[in-house]
Image (spheres, rainbow, N blue to C red):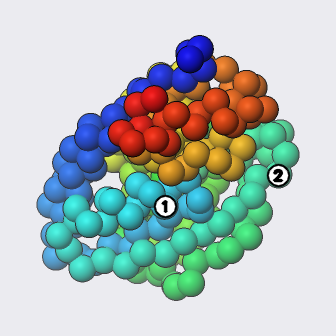
Amino acid sequence: MTEVARVLFRREDIRRRTRELGRTITGDYEGREPVLISVLKGGTVFLADLIREIRLPLRVDFMSISSYGGAAESMGRVRILKDLDEDISDSHVIVVEDIVDTGLTLSYLRSVLASRGPASIEICALLDRTVRRIAPLEVRYVGFECPDVFVVGYGLDVAGRFRNLPHILAVEDVQAVTERPELLLPYLAADGQA
Ligand code: IMP
Ligand code: MG
């Protein structure tokens, strides 16, 4: 098979790092009951694993957003398609994301959430691609630093697909896999290593 993609973060490494993050959050929020907020849809796979590594009472909530045009024009402004179910005033909020890239979306979302009077807000991202950061953003909990390549799997999609890949792949040819998603099918099989 031609190399359109390669395994970048293995399932086992994601699991180990998620366990470490869960342990750290458990320590940091001892005696409190955080609300973990995930942005649909990419962050949900990570959220599902992360919450089972946190040994505290907690709540989860979800938001769905759509950006106005390209990130650069919109400066991260987003339209809220589905808002939180619960009030976050006086709550300790942890926003859980798959990847922070330019940071535009999350810095805007963070200001929206901050205006609702939470006791605290922190960000937990599985991947942080700091080389592409435009909006300054403090990401308190980071799984892995992500190189400047398009990634897919473990919640991350390419044209809506392949969120269910067990490992995170680096996609070398995004156009090829967008036009011909079947190129990634081998990575769905058995151990997901193609
Ligand atoms: P930004 O930080 O505002 O640039 O946007 C980050 C969002 O873009 C993430 O929540 C992802 O949904 C999406 N995204 C950024 N980079 C990738 C990638 O490499 N693969 C899949 N989705 C990505
Ligand atoms: Mg996302």
Check disc 2 and give the amino acid type. Answer: Tyr
Residue 113 sits above or below residue 149 on the image = below
**Relative to the observer, which residue lies in front, 90 or 76?**
76
- Image side of residue 61 versus residue 105, left or right: left
Assign a secondary structure to mark 1.
helix
Crowding at dot 2, Cα within 10 Å, few <14 / some 14-19 / many 20+, comes out as some
Closer to the eye: label 1 or 2: 1
**Relative to the observer, which residue lies in front, 147 or 152?**
152
- The furthest residue to the top: 2
Q: Which residue is mark 1?
A: 44
Residue 126: x and y, percent? 40, 44
Residue drawn 27% across the image and 37% down it: 13
Q: Quadrant of residue 23?
A: bottom left
Residue 137: x and y, percent? 50, 42
Residue 142: x and y, percent? 35, 42
Assign a secondary structure to mark 2.
loop
- Image side of residue 26 versus residue 5, left or right: left
Residue 85 seen by the camera: yes
Residue 175: x and y, percent? 75, 26
Crowding at dot 1, Cα within 10 Å, few <14 / some 14-19 / many 20+, comes out as many
* The N terminus, quarter of image: top right
Residue drawn 31% across the image and 66% down it: 51
Q: Which residue is mark 2?
A: 68
CA separation in Å, label 1 and label 2:
22 Å
* The C terminus, quarter of image: top left
- Image side of residue 135 versus residue 124, left or right: right
Check disc 1 and give the amino acid type. Answer: Thr
Residue 92 sits above or below residue 133 on the image = below
- The furthest residue to the bottom: 86
- Image side of residue 164 versus residue 73, left or right: left
